[in-house]
Amino acid sequence: MKDFDNRISNSRISYMREQEEERLIKAVANQFGYNYVDLRGVTINPEALNIISVDVAHETEMLPFEMKRKNLSVAIHNPNNEKTQATIKELEEKGFLLNIFMTSASSLTHGFNRLEDIKSSKAVKHGLLDIDPENIERNMKRLRTVESVEKLILNIRTINSARRVSETLETIFAGAIGLGASDIHIEPEETGIRLRYRLDGVLQDVMDLENMIYKRLISRIKLLSGMILNKHNEAQDGRFSINVSEKEIEVRSSLIPGAIGESMVMRLLDPSVASFSMESLGLNDDMFKVMEQELARPNGMIITTGPTGSGKTTALYAFMRTTHKPGVKIITIEDPVEYKIENIVQTQVGVNYSFASGLRSILRQDPDIIMVGEIRDREVAETAVHAAQTGHLVFTTLHTNSAVGAFPRLLDLGVDPRVMGSSINIIIGQRLVRKLCENCKEEYQPSSEEKGLIETILKTHPNHPPITNDYKLYRPVGCKVCNDSGFRGRCGVFEAIKVDDAVEEVVIKDPREHVILEAAKSQAIPTMPEHGVERVMRGETSLSEVSRVVDLYSGRHMSKNNQGQAGDLDNPTSEKETLEPNSDDEFFKHIV
Ligand SMILES: [Zn+2]
């Protein structure tokens, strides 16, 4: 029997591949004179499962799986288990004719899951948990701190209890009720399974759960909530109730698929109780201050605009990093998830998880901040506006050429101009320009045309760099350092329009772009041409580079009041193209 112990009980077996395990069990069964069965390949008879209790099944490592009158087929894992032998004897004394099969640990686990499914389904039918309300009640009185919840769950981990999943779940509920939490969050992350409670409106870490217990907990909660067990790529919602202290506490559960695993949030309705930093984005000083204020606001929408590859998503990631603090839940819906940020629930659109449906599910996940990869249609626009109006900070992007261009786009998407003021905080426009290579850039005397254009643009810049009589500009040359391109790295050129009363008023009355720009003038935020030229004046990039991605011939500096001496560049009407993100770029290298 020592041989058996060595071969079966040795933990090394758990690392063996499934097929090898099955082969080994087959051989051992033969030695013992038993049959062999893989429970994954047979129909497990619920009637047979009912012969023994879940506890006994776990304790004895056995599972009855087929019954015809008194003929009972039983799968066992370890013939040396004394409890197994005792139960076999007991069943024989009850008059059962036993047909004993040996089965592998993984096969038995499959059987146990089926057993739990069936037992739990009955509980679901009755609308009650098959967990012990008395245990919850007993524990909720003594679980008064998050630490005590963790301690008890860790304690359950050490006891080899057949009710381990139930007891863990009971403790999670007992702790939540005892502490007066409004929500229970179970979130799989790369580093572990995070359990959090929302207490007094702020999320608080409880502990990391084991991966094994997480999967079973999710299955159990799915069953309890009436969700479909085998769907893993769809958002699901459900509800159930717990009866404790003569109260029926309703639990509304919400499940969303994630990059790592399913994320579960349970809201408790107790009837008696009511890396990419902002600094590295390269905002100009004025804009930086504006963004600091905007990111500190508790709700509303922050929209970044620009063509593909203009760094919109990167900016959103910087916003998330800035607002990401303990006690704040951020959920994203992206297409696809581009970068992983620790402690943020990131989800990805899929076949049954669109921006619109995903956003609705996310709203039920109790977030503080939501990042929506892109507003593409009316439904998403409406849901995002609704989210922003119901206490969430929403970060999103729109595919338009400028910040002001977002207004007609949103109107096209059916957003009521009268709700823009209450739902949209700020709209940002951005481009990426290449930075001149510091090793080879060359100073030169700008032409009168260039000077004319620069000075026209800077005239409307609310806080422009000094314009001296003999200022110089820089142009690219090319060297070894920059692979002869003359440029090295990229930086952002930004603009923004805050949706204040003045802007909201014109959006309702006369939403022409130049009218909106005029209304926003008092906000003292530079436009993209203004910020771009500021960068040119600082020698960070060249005028032709800015002109390549930003239309320098449109904007408020071209309005009648400011028009005058705008000169011609070589190719002012050339097609404005943008660069695709390049991992070598300095602009991106911090966030990976
Ligand atoms: Zn160079």
Image (cartoon, rainbow, N blue to C red):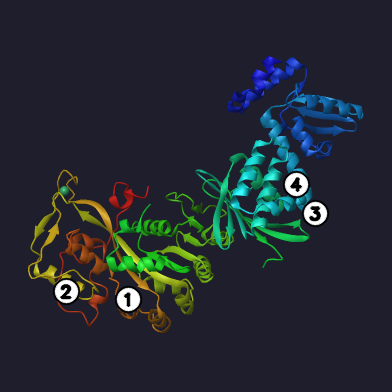
Label placed on residue 523: 1
Image-based side of 565 in relation to 499, left or right: left
Q: Residue furthest bottom?
A: 509
Going from N to C along the chain, the mark reached first, 2 or 3, is 3
Residue underneath mark 2: 566
Given contact means CB atoms under 8 Å apart, are the residues at marks 4 and 3 in contact? no
Quarter of the figure with residue 540: bottom left
Q: Amino acid at mark 2?
A: Ala
Judged from the image, the secondary structure of the residue bearing numbered disc 1 is helix
What whole-number distance in Å separates the C-alpha atoms at marks 1 and 4? 60 Å
Disc 1 marks a residue whose amino acid type is: Gln
- x, y percent for residue 327: 51, 58
Q: Which residue is pictured at 29% across the width and 49% down the height?
A: 585
In the image, is 303 to the left or to the right of 11?
left
Q: Mark 3: is the Cβ under 8 angstroms from ligand 1?
A: no
How much space separates mark 2 and mark 1, taking CA atoms? Answer: 24 Å
Residue under label 3, please give it. 126
Query: 418 or 422: which is nearer to us?
Result: 422
SS at circle 2: loop
In the rendered structure, which disc, 2 or 4, sits on the residue that comes first in sequence? Answer: 4
Q: CA distance from mark 4 to mark 3?
A: 10 Å
Residue type for callout 3: His
- Give neighbour class at mark 4: few <14, some 14-19, many 20+ (Cα, 10 Å): many
User: Dot 3 lies on which element?
Assistant: loop
In the image, which is nearer the foreground, mark 2 or mark 1? 1
Tell me, yes or no, whether the two marked residues, 1 and 4, touch with CB atoms within 8 Å. Answer: no
